[in-house]
Amino acid sequence: MSNSSSISQFLLLPLADTRQLQLLHLWFFLGISLAALLGNGLIISAVACDHHLHTPMHFFLLNLSLTDLGCICTTVPKAMHNSLWDTTAISYMGCVAQVFFFLFFIVTEISLLTIMCYDRYVAICKPLHYGTLLGSRACAHMAAAAWASGFLNALLHTATTFSLPLCHGNVLGQFFCEVPQILKLSCSQSYFKELGLIVVTACLAFSCFVFIVFSYVQIFRAVLRIPSEQGRHKAFSTCLPHLGVVSLFVSTAMFSYLKPPSISAPSLDLTLSVLYSVVPPALNPLIYSLRNQELKDAVRKMMTGCFSSTITCLFCSIEFIV
């Protein structure tokens, strides 16, 4: 990935103009990062340790939690570091790494959300075929395909973007390295190749979103046939938040990458990026586990066991000292 320019670092968009607001944004990012780390970490630990949760739905949820952790750990720590030390610089290779890993996790997450929707569709609309369509081998293949598609997509975008000559400075209008912001610095017509890749990726993401909406329509039709009002309420209260988070994630990400430069503004770009890169990783653990009684029981059991072990070790240490 050669670059004909002599850029050694990029300058990111500061989160605020004053020092007080920078520190306020720092605490906001710290709080939402800790919430994402705690929620996703608990899901990963519970699913990995409790054999009762070794089901297709929880297997995909574990993979989704891994992508959420990857997304938020790729962008937010550098923004927090810059706010704390009142700087905006990021090295050239650091920017390359941010672009690659962010696209890797984002594309993988879209694929996993589509697969999870398919899992719910089969479970509700075709329950008799669930074991056949979503066996352990099929689940492993679908998860591997999601991660492979994310890796290939990120590799293509990163290689194409950073092969362009950049001659319009090194200032990015975003708090992390984002492809559309880097393309604004290009002085070569070859950036249309990357624009083409973005359009293709956006079309694939939109296709996934259409599939998700279609699947949920079929799910809602099946739910309406449930005789129990309590069962319908539970199904709707589970599915609607899922659809809401997916819609927020896909719509803001596509608009951020496809919007014309004429309507670009630092405040708008910052808001959109937070909505698709920071908010979903923090909300997903809550949304996908709120109505999942098995997962909540597993987390409660795990936390109780850890607390009991800590108390036991503490008493052992006291007895040893005495």
Image (cartoon, rainbow, N blue to C red):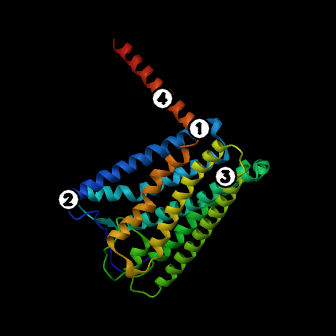
- Tag 1's secondary structure? helix
Front label number (4 vs 2): 2
Q: Residue 8: name its quadrant.
A: bottom left
Q: Residue 120: which numbered mark, if any?
A: 3
- Residue 44 image offset from top left, x and y in percent: 54, 43
Cα distance in 3D space between marks 3 and 4:
32 Å
Cα distance in 3D space between marks 4 and 1:
20 Å
Left or right side of 304 for 24: left
- Tag 4's secondary structure? helix
Q: Residue 19: which numbered mark, if any?
A: 2
Figure quadrant of the C terminus? top left
- Tag 2's secondary structure? helix
Of callouts 4 and 1, which one flags the residue occurring earlier in the amino acid sequence? Answer: 1
> What kind of residue is marked 3?
Arg
Question: Against 319, is 70 above or below?
Answer: below
Left or right side of 300 for 148: right
Q: Residue 306: which numbered mark, if any?
A: 4
Cα distance in 3D space between marks 3 and 2:
47 Å
> What kind of residue is marked 2?
Arg
Q: Residue 293: which numbered mark, if any?
A: 1
- Residue 272 image offset from top left, x and y in percent: 41, 66
Left or right side of 265 for 311: right
Residue under the point 60% across and 57% down = 112
